């Protein structure tokens, strides 16, 4: 395999096909393109899956799906009995997203396999492209649904309790989408994958700012999410005087600002906290808000520090509830540990970057990824490429063809080494 490596650095490593596929995938959206919205099990998600599965079949990969729709596209190695090397990411997209988050790892992973095929390589281990179901928490409120189930970190009972905003269950939606069989069967044992490597855009500004081609991810930060429901007292916005009010939104505002302050004062730049969902009831300009539902997102590379912010949030809720006379209920959705990437994969990625003559740096991932959960059942690591201005989860997310090409090039070399 080593003898084929120089071939990979040839300039004819073309990504025109990949760019066209990324563009075509972005057209499959619930929103008007170029805005990408692809919520899991939506009509757009199912069409996008069909498109990607078609590309995989065209590349000669054997495609299989599990009971929640995680998709495995396998390029058989010369020793099919060996555990495969995995690569991949997700193709679902949050509302009002761009076209690179997740998709670069899926279609870039496919391109890396095609490049190796074109070079006439026959890896010893099979290489499996994985397309994870619902990395984004949009529909069921919990991120990385497919990889959580795969790693056995979400029980069948917990999964069966998941509902979307319309009250439709995961069970109903996945079977309607054609994914049948027991959810229990989604869990995979340690050793099912020999190693797993995920290509992704950085979703932060550092690589671009520093003019670096590739990020070698050493750690993935620990995410947590808590839902809050604040119940106050509604009433007439004119008639009800200020002293007697129990305004649920005013209480929410205090909590949001306190959460922001506690993340800012954690002592580390790595602590981040966001309130991305805030629903106000009844939502009329002349009516005092009686109920607010919020979803909070707290992350840190350090789990204990993240947990201190989570604890401070709970304390703030108790204090605001008692002072304002509102009722606040909290529900912890997830509080996951961080993941450390595997030294052997990092070494392979570093050699690959050197051989491909790409500049690189080691860095942490502040975003979460399916690799965070795959780390429970396999050694994992991630390759980052820059994205313009660090922008992600927005329609103007952008990664240049050169950045994508570098990522695919280093990924292809890495896969060749890991599967040899
Ligand atoms: C993934 O989309 C994340 O929110 O980190
Ligand atoms: Mn995302
Ligand atoms: Mn992503």
Image (cartoon, rainbow, N blue to C red):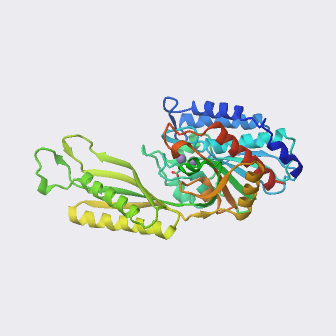
Front residue (pair 216, 177): 216
Q: Nearer the viewer, residue 400 or 86?
A: 400
State left or right for residue 320 relative to residue 42.
Answer: left
Q: Is 342 left, or right, of 168 in this rendering? A: right
- Res 104 quadrant in image: top right
Determine whether 209 is above or below 19 in the image.
Answer: below
As drawn, the residue found furthest toward the front would be 210
Q: Is residue 67 visible?
A: no
Please name whichever residue, 178 or 291, is drawn nearer the observer in this view of the structure: 291
Q: Give the vertical position of 217 relative to 40 (above or below).
A: below
Q: Position of residue 259 (x, y in %)?
A: 36, 60
The residue positioned 74% from the left and 63% from the top of the image is: 344
Residue depicted at 52% across the width and 58% down the height: 158
Q: Is residue 59 left or right of residue 161?
A: right
Q: Image height check: is 28 above or below 93? A: above
Task: Residue at 58% x, 61% y: name it.
Answer: 153
Q: Is residue 62 above or below residue 312?
A: above
Q: Position of residue 149 (x, y in %)?
A: 60, 56
Assign the C terminus to one quadrant of the image.
bottom right
The count of marks equals 0
Measuring 48% from the left and 40% from the top, which residue is drawn there? 394
Question: Can I make out residue 108 in this image?
Answer: yes
x then y, percent, for residue 24: 62, 30
């Amino acid at each position: 395999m080593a003898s084929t490596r120089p071939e990979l650095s040839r300039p004819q490593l073309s990504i025109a096909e990949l760019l066209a596929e990324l563009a075509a995938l972005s057209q499959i959206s619930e929103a008007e393109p170029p805005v990408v919205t692809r919520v899991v099990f939506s009509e757009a998600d199912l069409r996008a899956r069909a498109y990607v599965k078609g590309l995989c079949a065209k590349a000669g990969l054997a495609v299989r799906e599990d009971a929640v729709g995680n998709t495995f596209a396998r390029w058989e190695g010369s020793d099919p009995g060996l555990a495969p090397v995995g690569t991949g990411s997700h193709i679902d997209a949050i509302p009002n997203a761009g076209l690179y988050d997740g998709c670069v790892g899926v279609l870039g992973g496919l391109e890396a396999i095609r490049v190796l095929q074109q070079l006439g390589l026959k890896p010893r281990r099979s290489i499996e492209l994985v397309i994870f179901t619902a990395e984004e928490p949009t529909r069921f409120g919990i991120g990385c649904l497919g990889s959580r189930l795969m790693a056995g970190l979400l029980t069948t009972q917990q999964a069966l309790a998941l509902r979307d905003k319309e009250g439709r269950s995961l069970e109903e939606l996945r079977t309607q989408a054609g994914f049948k069989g027991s959810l229990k069967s989604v869990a995979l044992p340690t050793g099912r994958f020999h190693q797993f490597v995920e290509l992704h855009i950085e979703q932060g500004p550092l690589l671009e700012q520093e003019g670096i081609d590739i990020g070698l991810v050493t750690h993935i930060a620990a995410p947590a999410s808590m839902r809050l429901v604040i119940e106050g007292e509604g009433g007439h916005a004119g008639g009800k005087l200020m002293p007697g009010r129990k305004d649920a939104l005013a209480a929410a505002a205090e909590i949001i600002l306190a959460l922001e302050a506690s993340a800012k004062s954690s002592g580390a730049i790595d602590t981040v906290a966001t309130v991305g969902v805030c629903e106000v009831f009844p939502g009329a300009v002349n009516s005092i808000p009686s109920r607010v539902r919020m979803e909070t997102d707290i992350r840190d590379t350090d789990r204990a520090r993240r947990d201190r912010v989570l604890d401070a949030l709970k304390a703030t809720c108790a204090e605001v509830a008692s002072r304002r006379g509102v009722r606040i209920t909290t529900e912890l959705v997830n509080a996951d540990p961080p993941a450390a990437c595997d030294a052997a994969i990092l070494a392979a990625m570093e050699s690959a970057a050197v051989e491909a003559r790409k500049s690189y740096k080691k860095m942490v991932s502040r975003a979460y990824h399916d690799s965070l959960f795959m780390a429970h059942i396999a050694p994992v690591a991630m390759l980052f490429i820059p994205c313009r201005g660090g922008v992600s989860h927005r329609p103007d997310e952008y990664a240049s063809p050169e950045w994508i090409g570098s990522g695919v090039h280093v990924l292809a070399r890495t896969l060749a080494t890991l599967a040899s």
